[in-house]
Amino acid sequence: MAVSTGEGLEKLEDMIVRAAETTAAHARAARAAIGSVIFGQEQVVEQALITILSGGHALLVGVPGLAKTKLVETMGTVLGLDARRIQFTPDLMPSDILGTEVLEEAPGGKRSFRFLAGPVFAQLLMADEINRASPRTQSALLQAMQEQHVTVAGVRHDLPKPFHVLATQNPLEQEGTYPLPEAQLDRFLMEIDVDYPDIEAERKILFDTTGAEETRAKAAMTAEDLMAAQRLVRRLPVGESVVEAILGLVRSARPGPDAGDTGKLIAWGPGPRASQALMLAVRARALLDGRYAPSVDDVLALAEPILKHRMALTFSARADGITIAQVIGDIKTRVG
């Protein structure tokens, strides 16, 4: 008996809803598991999870001692990912990240090259203080982050799946650092500000981290669960009003007529990759909240972490004390 098109679509919708319910439960369990170890950083945890669910990379910016490293380690455990850490320093070489080929001699005297994989061959890579490495070493991550593979001595080596980079940056000590170029910044789906915890969270940190036993993270998902969630995020429906909000927001963050008077303050703005990032991130945020379609509120909530590292203000705007956060706030008011 033939199934009508309507019945087929209904079955497909039911499948997506059931998959979304399971995935949303996994994602919420992961957020709770991370929150049991990382105190007072609910927004940071949420934005980092949204980045991973969207299949992207994040740049964590904050002063030392705010648990940025611990967050990445915890996420690796909770999401069931193979996590590794690289401490970036001025003398770090690209081969220290990607790996190198070594010449080996077999018992019969035959010589051949063997590839020794570097720490980039992980599912979750923490690039600690990424701006302390030279531009040459920073650029070694570019191909890996965008294309999910690296090339060493002309040979392609695929990275494991999933593959995510969570990089950290200290906004204070700029001596001896190399600012990330715009091309590399654009590879990060979000720039996440890690701020100081409130007094109650800090009180909890004091007792939990200085006692005889420290709370340990527990796995809430597997790598397969995460990849299924990432596939589902791409299948969630997006309404026309949300699409228009995304386009309006991104296009208003560029110099030109779309931005109105605000455009005079902007030196350069986000490209289409920002629109793609928002399209994925709003779906992931909705899924994390147990909703199966994003809203304009999701667009507005994620506007700043997705746009701020993809735009710059003119010299006169900076001289007048105007910040990127203020400009994004004005754009959100117009779009919202």
Image: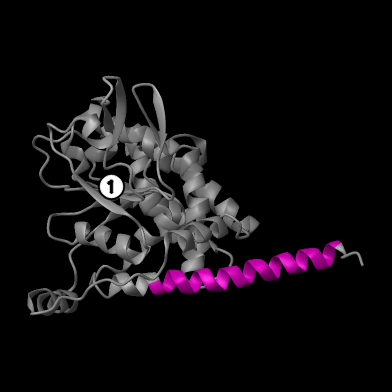
Q: Examine the residues drawn in magenta and state their main secondary structure.
A: helix
Q: Residue furthest right?
A: 1
Q: Which of these two is toward me, 73 or 326?
A: 73
**In the picture, which quadrant includes the N terminus?**
bottom right
The reply, left or right, for residue 70 in relation to residue 311 is: left
Residue under label 1: 323
Q: Residues within 10 Å of mark 1 (few under 14, many from 20)?
A: some
Percent position of residue 226, x then y: 46, 60
Asked whether the viewer can see residue 336, the reply is no
Q: Is 197 in the magenta?
A: no
The reply, left or right, for residue 139 in relation to residue 226 is: left
Residue drawn at x 52%, y 40% is 258
Residue drawn at x 33%, y 43% is 121
> Can you say whether 9 is above or below 166 in the image?
below
Amino acid type for the residue under numbered disc 1 = Thr
Q: Which residue lies furthest to the front in this view?
A: 108
Q: Is 17 in the magenta?
A: yes
Q: Which of these two is toward me, 71 or 307?
A: 71
Q: Which of these two is toward me, 209 or 304?
A: 209
Residue drawn at x 51%, y 68% is 23
Percent position of residue 294, x then y: 55, 63
For the record, the magenta segment spans: 5-29
Asked whether the viewer can see residue 4, the reply is yes
Percent position of residue 19, x then y: 59, 68
> Can you say whether 105 is above or below 8 in the image?
above
